[in-house]
Image (spheres, rainbow, N blue to C red):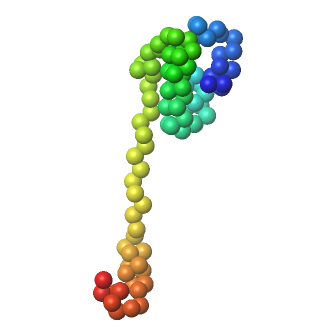
């Protein structure tokens, strides 16, 4: 919140609208390549701040939130699997 309020230090809090939040998102968060979770935390913090302190509701649904990244699992190569299967020396363990 501090970074946001410093970003708009010349503008009264009562005049901050959705466009200002989107501008901050584009000019600060995306420019500095901050994480998706940081961006979502920022939007949630603003919602709470304006709801509890300012007693007004912003239309945060209009602010585009990033989707969570879907990462593929690390896969072992055929050579790595072969090394794992060949590692046990005990016949019982090799059989399993």
Camera sees residue 94: yes
Camera sees residue 79: no
Q: Is residue 96 above or below residue 37?
A: below
Q: Residue at x 42, y 74 (%)?
A: 80
The N terminus, quarter of image? top right
Q: Quadrant of residue 69?
A: top left
Q: Position of 95 compared to 8: left or right?
A: left
Q: Position of 70 compared to 47: left or right?
A: left
Q: Quadrant of residue 25?
A: top right
Q: Position of residue 86 (x, y in %)?
A: 39, 85
Q: Position of 50 compared to 64: left or right?
A: right
Q: Residue at x 53, y 16 (%)?
A: 52
Q: Residue at x 40, y 57 (%)?
A: 73
Q: Position of residue 24 (x, y in %)?
A: 58, 22
Q: Residue at x 57, y 36 (%)?
A: 34
Q: Position of residue 5 (x, y in %)?
A: 65, 19
């Amino acid at each position: 919140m501090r970074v946001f309020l410093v970003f708009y230090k010349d503008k009264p809090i009562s005049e901050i609208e959705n466009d200002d939040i989107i501008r901050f998102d584009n000019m600060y968060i995306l420019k500095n390549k901050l994480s998706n979770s940081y961006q979502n935390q920022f939007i949630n913090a603003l919602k709470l701040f304006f709801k509890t302190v300012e007693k007004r509701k912003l239309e945060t649904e209009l602010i585009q939130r990033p989707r969570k990244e879907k990462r593929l699992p690390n896969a072992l190569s055929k050579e790595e699997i072969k090394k794992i299967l060949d590692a046990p020396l005990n016949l019982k363990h090799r059989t399993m």
